[in-house]
Image: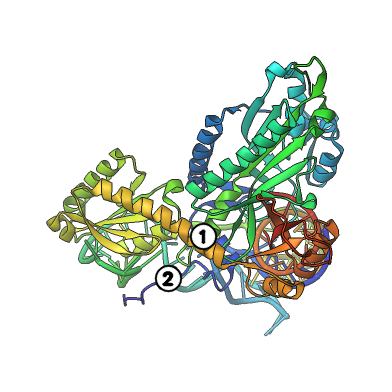
RNA sequence: CGGGAAGUAGCGAAGCAUGGUAUCGCGCCCGGUUCGGGACCGGGAGAUCGCGGGUUCAAAUCCCGCCUUCCCGACCA
């Protein structure tokens, strides 16, 4: 086997990113065994390796959600059709995407059930029963669940008919508290996604036309994918009193008056897995940030004929040491050649590979190979765990910084509409521009460029000058991009 | 949901025009030689040709319907 040039992919089963990003993404999902198609349109199977990533995201997020005073509960999958109908804007937004259950037990149902596309309706109904007094507030409940939205175009993880998520639903005494909660969660999402998934996001407010059906305001975090398109990575909604009024969620206030609660809802989904693939992955496949990698380390024993006797015991010893130190480690003792294993685990995105062979045993060391930089280095057995900790931390940091650099290099400001259109036509990425706040301009821009307002930065600063498209004074800056 | 393409073994493909019961590469299983970047030799298993109907003595091949996937557009986490 001739040596291939440095950096060239050994993986032939994956379409190069530059050749066809979309194809590349699908290849990675399938080859890394993250997910597979099911017989039902738009419904994927999340395979063990992909699900392990989700579990790590879940754990990281769940810990934070609980640390901020929220508790988990579970509400039903089925919702009587009538309940969804109660909030006018909400129905209008979700009706086209709702799946119905019309029969049960061999008989047609009196009232059709919907399969939840989101749980505001059922949770609001329950909150109306549970909340009586200001002393009952706030209610801070989260649930981990599946939801179903009948999508026309589906892609694994990014948009599927059924998906997994967490949805928080809270009820508060005052508008200010609800807003504070909405923003607190937005910040929590940003911190979690940036820390755990090493994925930089911009936090901001959604425009009226992009906000959640039935919300007062929607905030989002938006990430930039490797092909320069934006992806909404999480949303947090201030529901105002809209759902409280629709579902009659009232409480007796401190001043004895009866008032409607102020609500919020917020969620992130399995889409985050797709985002991580598209932010960090390369032509060799998946690149996982150590904090969400099912295996942070793969140990590959190297050896001649009798490696099982000579090298394997040492490899197992190393595995034990690293597992004891708290790492997620797999030892690949399959009867394959080392080079084959290298490619295999690179494709699956394992952050750090440890090679151990006769030469290393002699020198009382191991050879490490980083997935992110492909850098190889000998590391002495003494203090191995500590060194591995450093390397993994450095990979996590490097992936984040690399993504920030990419994001910044693909974020530009437009001074004129011509330049704006030009920027969106040429290099993909974010374009920041002043906006008058009108839905008409927003729609017009979308028609012209296919780009949408991803969100409006939190600072709330009003830029000088006029809207990028019309002559009205700018009301805010907006981040535009073509989005998934 | 419109426009286009595709579905044959785990993966990638050939066969289809001109109907006669399926071929190749990789992978998989067994044995052996190998092993520091996707090894080699020998033997072997594996396919209701996406699903359902139709035409025919005979259908992967022709006809009709449906399902799924991919790409491009309109809607969405």
Q: Is residue A86 left or right of residue A254?
A: right
Residue A309: x and y in percent read: 17, 51
**Quadrant hosting residue A338:** bottom left
Front: mark 1 or 2: 1
Residue A262: x and y in percent read: 75, 30
Q: Chain of mark 2?
A: A
SS for dot 1: helix
- Along the line of sight, the residue nearer the viewer: A466 or A370: A466
Read off the residue under disc 1. Answer: A404
Q: Is residue A298 visible?
A: yes
Same chain assignment for discs 1 and 2: yes
- Along the line of sight, the residue nearer the viewer: A299 or B67: A299
Residue A414: x and y in percent read: 69, 69
Q: Is residue A77 left or right of residue A406?
A: right
Q: Is residue A350 visible?
A: no
Question: Which residue: 22% across, 44% down?
Answer: A317
Does A242 sit above or below residue A160?
A: above
Does A157 sit above or below residue A408?
A: above
Read off the residue under disc 2. Answer: A9
Residue A438: x and y in percent read: 83, 57
**Quadrant hosting residue A73:** top right
Q: Which image quarter holds the N terminus of chain A?
A: bottom left
Measured in 3D between alpha carbons, the distance from the residue under mark 1 to the one under mark 2, in whole angstroms, is: 24 Å
* Total residue callouts: 2
């Amino acid at each position: 086997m001739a040596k291939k040039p440095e950096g060239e992919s050994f993986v032939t089963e994956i379409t190069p990113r530059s050749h066809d990003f979309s194809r590349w993404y699908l290849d990675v999902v399938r080859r890394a065994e993250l997910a597979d198609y099911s017989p039902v349109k738009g419904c994927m199977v999340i395979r063990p390796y992909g699900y392990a990533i989700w579990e790590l995201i879940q754990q990281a997020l769940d810990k934070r959600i609980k640390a901020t005073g929220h508790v988990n509960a579970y509400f039903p999958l089925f919702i009587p059709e009538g309940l969804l109908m109660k909030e006018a804007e909400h129905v209008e937004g979700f009706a086209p995407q709702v799946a119905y259950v019309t029969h049960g037990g061999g008989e047609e149902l009196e009232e059709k059930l919907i399969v939840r596309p989101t749980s505001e309706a059922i949770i609001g109904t329950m909150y109306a029963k549970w909340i009586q007094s200001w002393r009952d507030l706030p209610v801070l409940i989260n649930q981990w669940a599946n939801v179903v939205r009948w999508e026309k175009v589906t892609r694994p993880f990014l948009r599927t008919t059924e998906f997994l998520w967490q949805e928080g639903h809270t009820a508060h005494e005052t508008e200010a508290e609800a807003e504070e909660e909405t923003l607190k969660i937005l910040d929590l999402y940003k911190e979690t996604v940036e820390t755990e998934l090493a994925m930089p996001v911009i936090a901001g407010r959604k425009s009226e036309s992009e906000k959640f059906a039935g919300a007062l305001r929607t905030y989002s975090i938006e990430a930039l994918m490797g092909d320069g398109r934006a992806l909404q990575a999480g949303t947090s909604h201030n529901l105002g009193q809209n759902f409280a009024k629709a579902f009659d969620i009232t409480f007796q206030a401190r001043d004895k008056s009866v008032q409607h609660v102020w609500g919020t809802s917020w969620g992130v989904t399995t889409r985050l897995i797709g985002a991580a693939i598209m932010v960090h992955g390369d032509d060799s496949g998946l690149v996982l940030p150590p904090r969400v990698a099912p295996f942070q380390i793969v140990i590959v024993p190297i050896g001649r004929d009798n490696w099982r006797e000579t090298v394997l015991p040492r490899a197992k010893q190393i595995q034990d040491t690293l597992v004891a130190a708290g790492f997620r480690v797999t030892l690949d003792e399959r009867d394959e050649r080392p080079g084959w294993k290298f490619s295999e685990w690179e494709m699956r995105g394992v952050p750090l590979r440890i090679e151990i062979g006769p030469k290393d045993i002699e020198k009382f060391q191991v050879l490490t190979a980083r997935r992110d930089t492909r850098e190889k280095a000998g590391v002495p057995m003494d203090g191995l765990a500590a060194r591995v900790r450093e390397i993994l931390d450095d990979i996590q940091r490097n992936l984040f910084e690399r993504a920030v650099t990419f994001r910044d290099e693909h974020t530009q400001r437009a001074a004129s509409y011509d330049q704006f259109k030009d920027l969106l036509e040429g290099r993909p990425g974010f374009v920041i521009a002043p906006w008058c706040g009108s839905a008409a301009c927003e729609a017009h821009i979308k028609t012209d460029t296919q780009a949408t307002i991803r969100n409006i930065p939190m600072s709330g600063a009003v830029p000088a000058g006029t809207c990028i498209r019309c002559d009205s004074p700018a009301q805010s800056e907006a981040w535009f991009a073509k989005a998934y």
